[in-house]
Every structure is written in C-alpha cells, then in structure tokens.
Image (cartoon, rainbow, N blue to C red):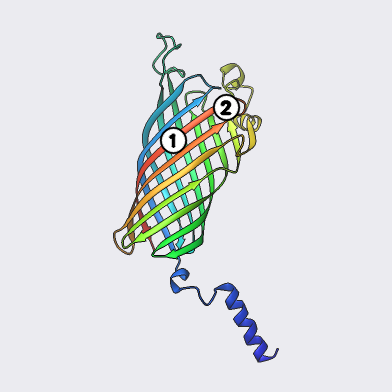
Amino acid sequence: MNPLKYTLLILCILLVREPLWASTDKLQKHKILGIRTGIYNLSSLDNLYSPFNYSGKALVLGLHFGTERPDRNKETRLVFSNINRDALSMAGIPSTYDPNHYLLLKNSFIFEAMDYFRFLIYDPGQDLRFYFSALWFTTVNITTNVMGLPELVQSGIAPGVMIRKNAGRHTFRTEIHTPLLAWTVRNNYGMSSPQTFEEFSKFAFIFQNSMLQSCFSAPGIYADISYGFRLNKAFRIDANYHFRYFQNSKPITLRSTSGMYSLSIIYTR
C-alpha cells in the first residue's frame, strides 16, 4: 500500500475512534465501588391481597459500583431490605386476629438492582452536563408471611435524563425515568393457600403469573436526587433520595410508592 494512503487510513481510524477535539479529560476513565445504608419506606395497595394499604420502613443496605467518565458512565446499585408493614386501616379486620396475621401485617423482603447507562448529550460549559439515561431495573418483593411468594417481581427498561453540576468538591445530580417495557409477575394469592400450594412449584407459579407490559398497563416513575462531596482524590460521600411510584392494572389494581434515603461512601480509582 502507498505510504501516503496508509498514513491517511491510520488518521481516519484515529479520527473515528477518538475525535481530535475530544479533551484529555473525556478520555479519563475511573472505576467506582461503594457501600450504602439508609432508610427504605414502602407503601402499597394490592387489591388482589386485601383492600388495605400496608406501609412501613426499615434499614436498607446496598452496594454501588461502575465506571465513570465525563462523556458517559455505567452505574449499578444493589439494595436489600426487610420491612414489616402494618395495615393502615383496621376496619373490617376482626379484633381477635393474631397481631402477625397476614391481614394485619405484611413482611416484605425487598431486593432491587438498578443499572444506569448514561451518555452525554449537551455540555453548555461551567461544569453543567445533560445526559440521556437508560435504566434497566429489577425489583423483587417477596411477601414472606404468605408462603414466601412474591407480591411483585418486575424487570424492564426505562429511558430518562440526568442533569449533573460540578462545583469544586461538590456534585449535584438529578435524574428521572419512566418505564417503557417490563416483565412483571404478580401474586394472585389463589395459589398461595395450603390447599393449592402443594400442587405448584414456585417456578410454575412465576410462569403462570407473569406478563409483558408497556408503559400504558404499568405506568411508573423513578426519580433520583443526590449530592456528593469529594473528600480527596480517592473517596467521596454521597447523600441520595430515590423515589419510585408504580401502578399495575392487570388483573386488578396494585399501587406502590417507595422512598429511600441513603448515605454512601464511594472509592474511585
């Protein structure tokens, strides 16, 4: 190959791979790892279960890891909690019931996995950046005092946007998503009775109660507000509030609202 053509080919490949106008800062990639703790509040009304609203709060623990660079980043958050939720209205519940009766108390084991993929779409300067954000969410809510079967299992995708502002050691972020498509499992509670539970495996239960849903049959919103303070080059502390509202209309109404206040310490290298 002609040396000039070979040189031009190499230059074209480099231009496509990393534009000449890309700043050195944008080429810096950092890995992050963190732990978090806080309070998880959960309230839900599942008309398949009972006509009552159940609400409670408990300690939440979580992990936080991913990669960061100014033009794009990937972040994964895992959280766990175990919440006792009382019925907010006792009307219609016999007073002779044991305090741990399933109509008086719901014990919910919660696991959530949030995978965020963010891409820079606008950089007006002054350390302010706008990102397109894609969220892959997975929620598992197991009602442990009803045969250990799920109130809700859901996994899906939610597009959104994130705004980030850096100011010295301080970082402010706000982010919002709305589910587009989700795979959902809801408990019909008919299989949860001792008479029928023996006839079904939990895998059969999941298969028979699962559905694919769009934003019309399962609308929702995920919102996130956080503040970060960098202690030094390696560590920062994040304060975060995460809000979720979810509604499901199949086969009948389920409404769920959760809010999580948390603190994280994050290591960057």
Image coordinates for residue 136, horizontal then vertical, percent: 55, 47
Q: Secondary structure at mark 1?
A: strand
Does 21 sit left or right of 170 as displayed? Answer: right
Q: Secondary structure at mark 2?
A: loop
Q: From the viewer's perspective, is residue 232 above or below residue 36?
A: below
| Residue 2 figure quarter | bottom right
What kind of residue is marked 2?
Asn
For image coordinates 51% across by 27% down, the residue present is 148
Q: Quadrant of the C terminus?
A: bottom left
Image coordinates for residue 22, horizontal then vertical, percent: 50, 73
Q: From the viewer's perspective, is residue 106 above or below residue 165?
A: above
Which of disc 1 and disc 2 is earlier in sequence? 2
User: Outermost residue, right direction?
Assistant: 1
Q: Quadrant of the N terminus?
A: bottom right
For image coordinates 46% across by 33% down, the residue present is 257
Residue closer to the observer: 82 or 169:
169
Q: CA distance from mark 2 to mark 1?
A: 19 Å
For residue 258, the mark is 1
Mark 2 Cα shell of 10 Å, populated few (<14), some (14-19), many (≥20) = many
Residue receiving disc 2: 187
For image coordinates 65% across by 90% down, the residue present is 4
| Residue 6 figure quarter | bottom right
What kind of residue is marked 1?
Ser
Image coordinates for residue 168, horizontal then vertical, percent: 31, 63
For image coordinates 44% across by 24% down, the residue present is 54
Residue 70 appears anywhere in the view: no
Q: From the viewer's perspective, is residue 10 above or below residue 72?
A: below
